[in-house]
Image (tube, rainbow, N blue to C red):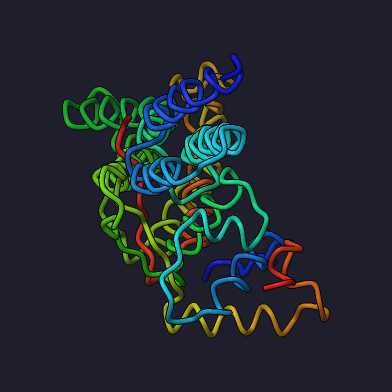
Amino acid sequence: MPRQRKCSAQSVAVLSALVSLPRTWQHGYELSKLTGLASGTLYPILGRLDDRGYLESKWLESTQAGRPPRHVYRLTTRGSSYAREVLDQQPDGQTMTSPYYAKA
Amino acid sequence: MTVGAFLSPQLSRALRRHALRACPPPRLELIRAAANELDYVTSPTESLIWSIGIVRASYWERLRSMSIASPLISKPVLLLEALICFLPVSFFWSEISLDVITGLIPRTEGLLLITSAMVGPLGMASFGELLLGKAPIDASFRAFTLALLVAWAAVVEFILPLTSSILWSLPWRDGVLLLLLPLAAVGHYSFLACNTSSSDTWRPQPAS
């Protein structure tokens, strides 16, 4: 059985952003804006969540001509339960790192 | 247009290309996803920051695949580990087996040595399975068996000098090749076995 590692503040922010819109597909740039995380931090977190089966993802063709497809993410049922479990353990107001998200 | 505004998109694109080249194949989709997002970032400064982040993520994934503590360990690292730790003892095992068959070594002493060196071929087989990308469902049992064999080799190392065998002429060299190196590899194998859930597979990465 793998050891359950403590969730980092950045991972908590990503989970929090994803769980706030549970059935909506969100792309990396949007998640970066929501959480205030740089791409270099965000994508390894998304990769780890995906490895553990907490995320589902798909490629979405762009509506804008000449733009590449976007990879979009949302939580799986298992991921939603995990996110709620993690967020329940957080002290109030410490689930988001971005001031942008606080206004949203 | 300033020089910075002109150079920034070019630099961003160069960084993106580098990130995609540096990324290990199993993580390419993730890095490609980040790279594609670059076309949706409008500000040149933001685009530069985003592309630096992609390079960072790519290198992070590359380093992660090199860590021996990760079940996502790279194939070349596993192969090197198997060769260093189990190949000498495997050669020793095959040589002793041949000598016992041809009658060059007394049978009792030979069997003692063959059983103590069994960790070599078994270790090679276990690591070979990982290299082929198969998920050993009985990894914990195998790790236990390998650990028992190393323990037995240690017992033999203490017994053999008492029998004044000519085979034990260089105890330090034999101790390292037959005992310490297999012990280290078996320790690592056990660590991987204990840190991988039953639903998860061992996924050594292909050589990039």
Q: How many marks?
A: 0
* Camera-nearest residue between B120 and B187: B187
User: Residue B113 location, x and y as percent?
Assistant: 38, 36
* Camera-nearest residue between B128 and A32: A32
User: Residue A38 location, x and y as percent?
Assistant: 62, 47
User: Residue B78 location, x and y as percent?
Assistant: 40, 36
The furthest residue to the left:
B102
The furthest residue to the front:
B1
Residue A77 in the image: above or below residue B179: below
Horizontal relation, residue B158 to residue A95: left or right: left
* Camera-nearest residue between B201 and A84: A84
Regarding residue A9, the answer to whether it shows in the image is yes
Look at 54% across and 17% down and name the residue there: B170
Look at 62% across and 69% down and name the residue there: A4
Look at 61% across and 57% down and name the residue there: A33
Regarding residue B162, the answer to whether it shows in the image is no
Look at 57% across and 23% down and name the residue there: B5
Horizontal relation, residue B69 to residue B116: left or right: right
User: Residue A13 location, x and y as percent?
Assistant: 66, 66
| Quadrant of the rendering where the C terminus of chain B is positioned | top left
Residue B141 in the image: above or below residue B119: below
Residue A77 in the image: above or below residue B184: below
| Quadrant of the rendering where the N terminus of chain B is positioned | top right
Q: Quadrant of residue B200?
A: bottom left
